[in-house]
Image (spheres, rainbow, N blue to C red):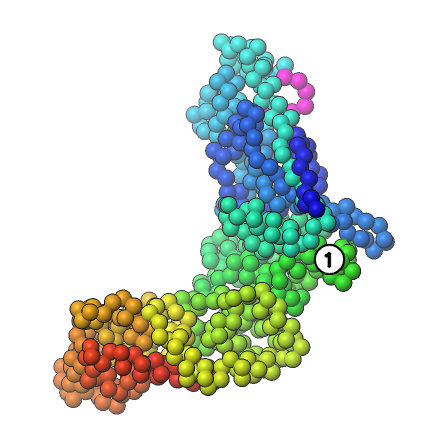
Amino acid sequence: MQKYTVNQYFVSNILNWVQEKEIAIPEIQRPFVWNSTKVRDLMDSLYKGFPIGYIIAWKNPDVRLKDGSVSNGKKILIDGQQRITALRAGVLGQNIINIDYKEERVFIAFHPLTEEFATLTPAIAKDKAWIQDISKLMTKDGGLFEDVTNYCEKNPEADRRLIEKNIEKLLQIKSKQIGFIELDSALDIETVTEIFIRINSKGVVLSQADFAMSKIASYDKEDHFGVNLRKCIDYFCHLSREPQFYKHISENDIEFKKTIYLSKITWLKDEKDDLYDPDYSDVLRVSFTKQFERGKMADLVGLLSGRNFETRTFEQNIMDDSFQKLRDAVLEYVNETNFKRFVMIIKSCGFTSNDLINSQNALNFAYILFLKLREKHENPGLIEKYVQRWFVMSLLTGRYSGSPESQFDSDIKQVSKDGAEKILQSIEDGQLSEAYWNAQLIQELDKASINNPFLNLFFAAQIKAGDKGFLSTDITVGNMIDHRGDIHHLFPREYLKVNGFERGDYNQIANFVYAQSEINIKVGKSAPKDYMGEVREQTNGGKLTYGGITDEKALRENLKQNCIPHSFEEMDVSHYENFLKERRKLMAKKIKDYYFGL
C-alpha cells in the first residue's frame, strides 16, 4: 500500500495553509534553532530556484462528532518546521521564538543590484543600496512601480530596468514550488510515529514523545489549549534546570502568563534541588502512564487523535476527553506539594544526589506509583514505604533497563488491579530470593566501575544509615557525596599498579570507599597493613595522622560501617583477591539489610 502522496505546492499555498491553521505547526515544538544566516540562505536558494527539500505532513484521521458528522483532520507537520518558520519570518515578517524562548524578528535584506541576501546589520541599515526588510515587499498588495521608483530615487545611479527585474524575481519566491509529502490518514499511529522518528533521525534524535508533543501543540480548542499545555510541560522542564529562566517567561510570554499554568510552576523559580530534573518525555511518560494506566507512548498519540481502540475509529469526544485527562495529570505532576514530597521520599532512602541514580525510568515509575497511591488515598506512611521499596527494587533488578514501555504498561496495570504491596511481594519472592542476595548480587559487585548502580546502592545504604566516611569521626558519606568528596581505593591504585595489577583489577567496586581528601592523600601508595598500622597507633595514644579516630571501639565501628573485613589491617598485595571476595559479601549483606529496612 502506498503510504503517502507527493505533490508540488507554491510557497504562498503552504504559508496560507499555516495561516488558516490547515497545517498544525506547533509553535514551540522546538524553539527556532536556525540562526539568521540560515534564513538568509533559504531565501537565496528559493530566489535562485534551488531545491530546499520536502515538507512532510500527516493528515490526521477524520474524527466523528457527537452529531454523527465528520470533522476533517488537520495536517500535522512531521518534518519541515524550521523551514516553514524561516519562511514565515522572511516572507511574512512574523516573529519567531528563539532559543531563549523570546519573541524576535529576523530581518532579511536584499541588494537588487548584486542580487545578494543578508541578515540586517547596522551597516546595511545605513546603506541605501539595500532593501532592509524583504517581507515589506512580499506582503504588500499592488504592483512594483512605487517600490522601484522609491528605490531609484534613493539610488539615482541604478539601472531602473535591472532593479525592476530583480525585485520582480524576488517576489516570485512566493510562487516557487516546494515538494510536499502527505502521509496517508489511514496509517496507524505506530507507523506514523516510526516514520516521524526515522525522518528526523539524521538531525536531533527524536522520539515518540516528540511526536506526542507535536500532537499536543496542534490541539487548538479554547484559548490555545494545546499550545499552552505544551508550554507548561516545556517550561517546567526548563525551569527545573534553570530557575532564572522564569524571568524570560514572565516578561516575554504574555499569553502564557494569563493562563493558570504559570502559577502552577512559579514555585520552581526559587527551587535549587536537582535530584529529579525531568525532560518533557519524563513528564509525558509519568502523566500518561499514571492517568491512562498505559505505558506505550504511541497509545497517547492515538488517544490524543481520538482513537477508539475497540472500534478502531476516531472520535472527537475521545480526543477532547484525552486532552482533558492529560492536562489534569500534567498539573498533578508539576504540583509543588506532590513533586517536593516525592523528592523527599527518594532522598530519605539515601539517594540524596542525582549522581547516585543510574536509571531515570526507575525514578519516573516511582513517581507514577507515588501519584497513583495518592490518588487512592493510601496511608502516607505506606506510600513512603512502597515508593522507596519499588524504586530500590527497580535498581536492584534493572527492571526498566530493557523495554521500559512494556514494563511500565505491565506494572501500572498490575498495581491498579492488585495493589503495590501484593505486586512488590511477588517480585521479591521471584527476583530477590536468598539466591539473589547470596550469589547474584555478589557477582554484580564483581565489576570494575566507579559509575555502577550497585556501588551507588551501597553508598545509598550508607547514607540512609548515617555511616561515617572511611576513618572519619564526624564527616558522613552523605556529607562527602553532597560536597563531591573523594572515592578512595582501600588498596591504593599506585600500590597495586607497581605490583603488576591493571585498571580492571584496581578499579574493582569492592576496592572503593568514600574518604576525606586529607586521609586519601596521607594514605598515598602505602599497603593497607602499613597505613592501618599507623591508625592502630593512633588508637593507643600515638600521633594523629589519619582522621580523628583515637580508640579501638570507634575504629572497629568505622570499619564495620564501611564493610571492611576484620583482617584488613594485616593485608598486603598478596591478600588483595581474598579481600575483594570478603568485602563483596559484606557489601551485599549491607544492601540486603538496607532494602528490607525500608
- In reply to whether residue 62 is colored magenta, the answer given is no
Residue at image coords 24%, 78%: 576
Residue 275 on image: x %, y %: 45, 66
**Left or right of 190: which side holds 545?**
left
**Left or right of 99: which side holds 583?**
left
Label 1: state its secondary structure.
strand
Work out which residue is located at the far left of the displayed protein and give it.
542
From the viewer's perspective, is residue 275 above or below residue 181?
Answer: below
Residue at image coords 29%, 82%: 564
From the viewer's perspective, is residue 270 above or below residue 472?
Answer: above
Residue 6 visible in rendering? yes
From the viewer's perspective, is residue 417 above or below residue 131?
Answer: below
The prevailing secondary structure element of the residues shown in magenta is loop
From the viewer's perspective, is residue 184 above or below residue 171?
Answer: below
Binning the other alpha carbons within 10 Å of mark 1 as few (below 14), some (14 to 19) or many (20 upward) gives many
- In reply to whether residue 141 is colored magenta, the answer given is yes
Residue at image coords 68%, 39%: 5
Q: Quadrant of residue 569?
A: bottom left
Q: Amino acid at mark 1?
A: Arg
Work out which residue is located at the far right of the displayed protein and give it.
67
Residue at image coords 66%, 60%: 299
Residue 572 on image: x %, y %: 19, 79
- Nearest the eye: 215 or 399: 399
> Which residues are drawn in magenta?
137-144
Residue 26 on image: x %, y %: 62, 46
- Nearest the eye: 70 or 491: 491
Residue 279 on image: x %, y %: 52, 58
Where is mark 1, residue-wise? 307
